[in-house]
Amino acid sequence: MKLIIAGNDRSEDLAKELEQSAARHPDGGLLSLLEGEAAILCLKDAPDEFDYRVRHLLLIRSRHSVDPTLWTIPLGRGVSGRLFYWIRRILWKLLFPFLSRMAFEQNTVNQMLMNQLVLEHQTQEKARRELDRRLRELENRMGPVAEEIRLKVAK
């Protein structure tokens, strides 16, 4: 990775300083929230729109919930930072039952929406298959005329 600031390559002198600074700061639980993001890359490998939708629904289904237990309180710098950390921690303990209830309600809504999306997708897929079947049946009945029409439409 190159660090370019104001047109100057500062990779050499800033890289070690940034690595040390990053090592001092905990991730605050953010990395655990991103674990499933690698699965999103499977979307680019979808051969067609239908497969893309199926993969996308599977990803949404696996990532639709909110978990307040994963949230952390960052530690601030200096004396005031530590003071505010303890104030936030006390507030967090007081508010956590209410936040948990709100998260539960949000998860319930998310689950219902997800189920509705899956149902809608299945309904559309069933209708598409039925239309494909009827189209093949009509083409078989029409015989060579259907081929001529298909060639004219393709032009």
Image (spheres, grey):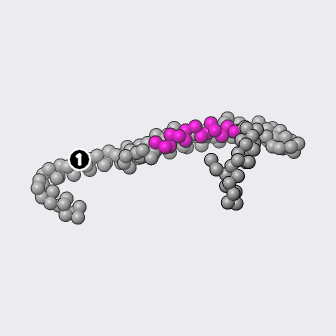
Mark 1 crowd level (few <14, some 14–19, many ≥20, 10 Å Cα) = few
- What residue do we see at 73% from left, 38% from top? 23
Q: Nearer the viewer, residue 59 or 118?
A: 59
Query: Going 79% across and 38% down the picture, which residue do you hit?
Result: 89
Would you name the residue on which mark 1 appears?
133
Residue 44 appears anywhere in the view: yes
* 31 drawn magenta: yes
Residue 29 in the image: state x and y as whole percent: 67, 37
Left or right of residue 22: residue 39: left
Please identify the quarter of the rendering in which residue 57 is found: top left
Residue stretch in magenta: 27-42
Q: In x, y percent, where is residue 95?
A: 74, 40
Q: Residue at x 20, y 49 (%)?
A: 136
Whether 40 is among the magenta residues is yes
Q: Residue at x 68, y 49 (%)?
A: 11
Tag 1, which secondary structure?
Answer: helix
- In the rendered view of the protein, which quadrant contains the C terminus? bottom left
